[in-house]
Image (tube, helix red, strand yellow):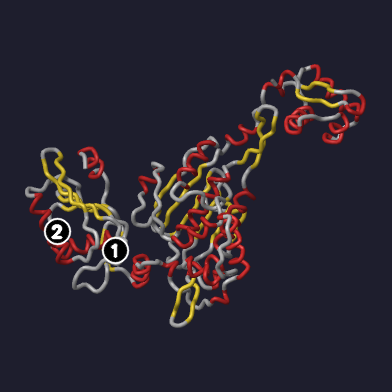
Amino acid sequence: MTPEMFEELINQREGETLEFKQEMPSSSDLAKLITALYNTRGGMIVFGVENDTRRLAGIPNPQGVETGIVNIIQDRCSLDVMPCIEFVSYQHMEFVVVTCPQGARKPYLVSRETRPYIRVGSSNREAQDEEIRRMYIEGSEGGFEGLPSLGATLADLSEALIAAYIRRREEMSGQPLDLSWEEALRNLGCVVEQGEIWVPTNAGVMLFAEAPQRFIGQAEVTCVRFKGTDVVSYIDRRDLRGPLYQLVDDAEQFIYRHMKVGRRIEGFVGVEYREYPGEAVREAIVNAVVHRDYSRQGQRIRVFMFDDRIEVYSPGTLPPGVSLEKMRRLEPQSVLRNPVIVGVFRDLGSRYIERLGTGIRRMALTMEGHGLSRPRFEEVGSEFRVTLMGPGERFMAETAKFPAWTKGLNERQVEAVLYVGEHRWISRREYAELLVVSSRTAARDLSDLVERGILVLRGAGRGAHYVLGPRSV
């Protein structure tokens, strides 16, 4: 850690991922702190800084502190990965910085303690029963998606959905799968043997049941179009249910239904111009659906649309090994919380997942290509939020731009030129029908366009038609 990085660190306030210690605490308190960080989101402990005033005191014997930390961890903590311990020299003083990762094998216990500890704000406390249950699920080999779905049987899975998936996978691979649907589900990890029978996993239910919310109520998406830029009142709301891929499609259509659509002229062609790029919207929704923490009961994905932005909330913090800083730098990361769900979405084709680990970068580049700022990625409490900022008032200004060739033309003539730009030519009869005018008006408008050099008359009689002229070159 460089002195500049350390200075930035000590200027922060204590919180869920940062703790200051002037000196070594008791072995019990330090063990609780370290395991709490491992059980929550990871974080740093800085020795040599007063926790209340942030006054720099330094450590007279950093090697002794390091030895004490290692001894306490080995004696009191059940860790699978040791924290990183660094010595930092700053303003002629020595400090010790301990970096604890978020653990992948939760819960982590303190010896002779019966309940694990977690971080809440800048303090440590014993985890409650629901929090402990979730930690065990997060730390299990298959996570929540790999557990048997309570109360569900194979009869609750839709053969039509399974057949559609197999058909799509065969189309993508170009060869037959040669598996029964039961074998395909076993290979995917969507069914598991329980006693002497096979039952669906949570992933199997969420992917292949017509109504998975009967068994997993939190597998819903709430979409709201708010009025204005705050959550005071809303225009439309939908609580979406169904298999996961349908949630993605329905949430995307909700946004499209409320998205402003205009047209701008590029050359001699009218191009539809949407408020947000569809690829970025779909990527944000797909990421929320395939990566959320489904073990969190009572929480659902929320897609909020305002006048100036779209916010997508996904329950659960980032999984161990995924860095918010790397995400903001658009660096590829492919640590998966729900590998079974991700695998099935990937098999359904590039509409959902194009290449693992590249979605964040593509989302950002698509927004920039649309003239918008990059998405904002944040952890807000126990949720992950993606914000897509829209064009706001710039949208109407963008659609109101007209190229020089339109100057002096009426709306009918502009529409006719754009029609020629798309269809290559137009006749006088087509002009009259398209713009709902008389033949005489059509002839007058077209003659004016010829005089201006925008269109050129080709042919004669019934074969007469108009094409783009010299001003289109």
Q: Which mark is residue 346?
A: none
Q: Which mark lies nearer to you, 1 or 2? A: 2
Judge by depth and name the residue closer to the eye, 459 or 148.
459
Of the 4 image quadrants, the one containing the N terminus is: top left
The amino acid marked with disc number 1 is Ile
Q: Residues within 10 Å of mark 1 (few under 14, many from 20)?
A: many
Q: Is residue 58 above or below residue 263?
A: below
Q: Which mark is residue 118?
A: 1
Judge by depth and name the residue closer to the eye, 291 or 438.
291
In the picture of the structure, the residue carrying the numbered disc 2 is 70
Q: Residue furthest bottom?
A: 196
Which residue is at a point 51% across and 42% down the rendered structure image?
389
Which residue is at a point 84% across and 21% down the rendered structure image?
447
The CA span between labels 1 and 2 is 21 Å
Q: Is residue 289 above or below residue 434?
A: below
Which residue is at a point 80% across and 21% down the rendered structure image?
456
Q: Is residue 465 above or below residue 395?
A: above
Q: Secondary structure at mark 2?
A: helix
The amino acid marked with disc number 2 is Val
Percent across and percent down for residue 51 are 19, 52
Which residue is at a point 17% across and 53% down the rendered structure image?
21
Report the side of 156 relative to 41 (left or right): right
Judge by depth and name the residue closer to the eye, 139 or 297.
139
| Labels 1 and 2: the sequence-earlier one | 2
Percent across and percent down for residue 397 are 61, 32
